[in-house]
Amino acid sequence: MTDIISAAIEGAGADELAALPMPESYKAAYVERGDIAMFEGLESDDKDPRKSLKVGEVDLPELAPDEAYVLIMASSINFNTVWTSIFEPLPTFGFLDRLGKESVWGARHALDKHIVGSDGSGIVLKTGSAVRLWKSGDKVTLHCNYLDDQDPTAHDDSMMAVNQRIWGFETNFGGLAEIAVVKANQLMPKPTHLTWEESAINALCNSTAYRMVVSPNGAGMTQGDKALIWGASGGLGAYAVQHVLNGGGTPVGVVSSASKVALLNELGVDAVIDRKEKGYRFWSDEFHQDESEWRRLGKDIRGLVGEDVDFVFEHPGRQTMGASVFVTKRGGKIVTCAATSGYMIEYDNRHLWMKLKSIIGSHFANYREAWEANQLICDGVVLPPLSAVYTLDEVGDAAYQVHKNLHEGKIGVLCAAPAEGLGIDDPEKRAAIGEDRLTIFRRHA
Ligand code: NDP
């Protein structure tokens, strides 16, 4: 592994990299099948990723013809790694076992160690015999839409494929590791002006937010739209607010502290609600919601932007969905991709049908949407919301930060990269965008 990492960092050419022998094992973060009962009886909040996420050597699997080995310079923590690490809502070994039954190549995934991680930036080490458009030495970022391209349902919008999966969550050999195994159609160009860790954090959350906000598969926003963005300084929200601003809309960001308000203001979001300060109680007890609290939120939004919102960017789920449906304007959309606070949702359907609103389910992004979202990062018009960087050995601590909502934006994880700040190929472009803009989240962390 050391030879490969040194060669890659020293800028070895395609032939030199391709000629290097692959190691038999590599360092990775994983959970173990034998641990799936370790948190039984505990509340979600008390389940600790630091106990379940382990770091150690794992065997390198054989490469399928349509795949690539990628040296992962950096990766990031996504909430799906938190879900895997607390074995909720289901242990992810069930996904691996199902994939294991699909094909000979799928069988490699059904192991007792699940190597996690659904983001990564790095260098292509080797490609399978069927890979045409990528080669050893290419600098890449990875998106997590894992598809069978021989499945007819995977064409048109590939998120509609019956066996669509998220790499590193529903598959093995994820990105929180020195090497990842990915399908060639997960590869995208690395932004030349960013460091490895800045490049690694974007694909999952940026692409998801892009589909929800910009794509006709989501809100399909147009100029002048007003949008309520929950968790506006979190992983998804940090991209959603930028998409709305860039598209000529007005985001109303919701966060939970004065420091997050300041961060969003610096990012260009003027209308921000501090939900902690406002003390909304949408649920008066475990079983009943309070419409007057929904109304209070709606009034606060009108106070900031003068009217109701065209769409809501929804992911907290049970705690907020009733309010989200209520505050959306007549004919508006509630686009939802998650339910962090609970997936059994309740809202007053009268407000939905009488005002002709629609709820749109959304999940990650198809290749085209992911590519378009990546292009916005490459162009420097969407900024990477990197707030902190951990090493691979500290992956449990990093996941703990996200589980406990102690972070802002995204947390990067150094894998093969020996230090922060490496990987910038176009310093002039970086200077033109501005170091200050690129480090807003870091400065506010
Ligand atoms: P983060 O933890 O980075 O951000 C979520 C934000 O939501 C927090 O910063 C917090 O902001 C806010 N929040 C948390 N709980 C509540 C609540 N009860 N009420 C209102 N706001 C709340 O996570 P991500 O943005 O990365 O992911 C959010 C969810 O989306 C996760 O469940 C994740 O699994 C899911 N997801 C789904 C994807 C998909 O493709 N379907 C893709 C990516 C993520 P604050 O406290 O400041 O208000």
Image (cartoon, rainbow, N blue to C red):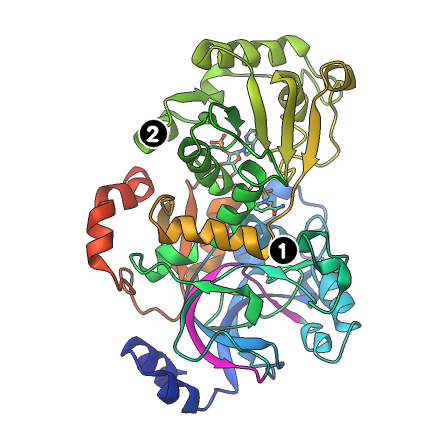
Left or right for 71, reference 297: left
Q: Report the span colored magenta.
A: 113-129
Q: Are marks 2 and 1 in contact (CB under 8 Å)?
A: no
Which residue is painted at 54% across and 36% down in the image?
Answer: 213
Q: What whole-number distance in Å separates the C-alpha atoms at marks 2 and 1? A: 34 Å
Left or right for 199, reference 155: left
Magenta part, dominant SS: strand
**Quadrant location of the N terminus?**
bottom left
Which image quarter has ligand 1? top right
Q: How many marks?
A: 2
Q: Quadrant of residue 274 in the image? A: top left
Q: Quadrant of residue 87 in the image? A: bottom right
Which residue is painted at 48% across and 69% down in the image?
Answer: 177
Residue topped by disc 1: 84
- Vertical relation: 413 (above or below) 357: below
Which residue is painted at 63% across and 55% down in the image?
Answer: 84
Instruction: Say if disc 2 is inside 8 Å of ligand 1.
Output: no
Residue 60: give x, y in percent of width and height: 56, 81
Task: Say whether residue 137 is magenta.
Answer: no
- Vertical relation: 294 (above or below) 177: above
Viewer-side label of 2, 1: 2
Category of crowding for the residue at label 2, using alpha-carbon neighbours closer than 10 angstroms: few (below 14), some (14–19), many (at least 20): few
Residue topped by disc 2: 268
